[in-house]
Image: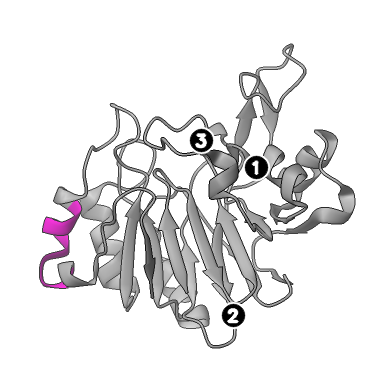
Amino acid sequence: MKITWFGHSAFRIAFGDTVILIDPFLSGNPKFDGDAMEAAAGCTHVLLTHGHDDHVGDALEILNATGAQLVGAFEVCMSLVALGVGEDKINPGNHGGTVDCGGFSTSFVNALHSSSLSAGHPAVKDGGIAFLYMGNPLGLIVKAPGEPVLYHMGDTDIFGDMALINEIHRPEIGIVPIGDRFTMGAKTAAMACQRFFDFRTVLPCHYGTFPIIDQSADAFLSEMGDDAGKVTVTAIGEAFDL
């Protein structure tokens, strides 16, 4: 499995013939200075944790350019269909469900957050609305034969049922928001990782993008203490193997 972080919560996950983009906030991302379509080259699936602008990002353009399949909450999928994605290109679900994505599966788990697309997002053509309802936020569990189980938490606070997520899915790779204000901060993110999971690798995200959230992973590494060695902090755009 090869993973690339594009800043914020955007990741490229590649294995076998599969190339997944999760929350592809690229062209509007102040920390990503590459080309969105180059980052999306070969994309077979776009997975969205929720409908906020900084997570939907370039999904519509990538889906239409690549013919990739969209995987996410029912409302997210149907909203993007209304905005031009082919109805045959969606694979919707919701909390508790698992969908076959061809070569891997995605399970939908809880996340404590909100989910809507603002009228300012380029995909929303009707400027007369304030927000487009995009269903409930999700965490995503990705499982593929022969690959480590990956859990992208989405945007969330800590919650006790993370223990059940671990019991049911046994994720080995955790993509964990740490930036505070809109998600867990360093202390609660470290508590979530240490109390509820036995991650082999922790990939922090949702930090450094905007001035109002934490600018580095330093506090998170400090809070992880003896488990800091499990944390992989990579440069934006740098691919690494797991």
Residue at disc 2, secondary structure: loop
Label 2: how many residues lie within 10 Å, few (<14), some (14-19) or many (20+)?
A: some
Instruction: Read off the residue under disc 3.
Output: 54
The mark found on residue 147 in the picture is: none
Q: Amino acid at mark 1?
A: Ala
The mark found on residue 59 in the picture is: 1
Residue at disc 3, secondary structure: helix
Q: Which quadrant of the figure has residue 85? A: top right
Is 187 located above or below residue 181 in the figure? below
Instruction: Read off the residue under disc 2.
Output: 144
Q: CA distance from mark 3 to mark 1?
A: 11 Å
Q: Residue at x 31, y 66 (%)?
A: 202
Q: Amino acid at mark 2?
A: Ala
Q: Residue at x 27, y 46 (%)?
A: 185
Tell me which label, 1 or 2, sits earlier in the chain.
1
In x, y percent, where is residue 37? Answer: 60, 43
The answer to whether the residue labelled 2 contacts the one labelled 3, judged by CB atoms less than 8 Å apart, is no
Q: Residue at x 47, y 74 (%)?
A: 1
The answer to whether the residue labelled 1 contacts the one labelled 2, judged by CB atoms less than 8 Å apart, is no
Is 94 located above or below residue 132 in the figure? below
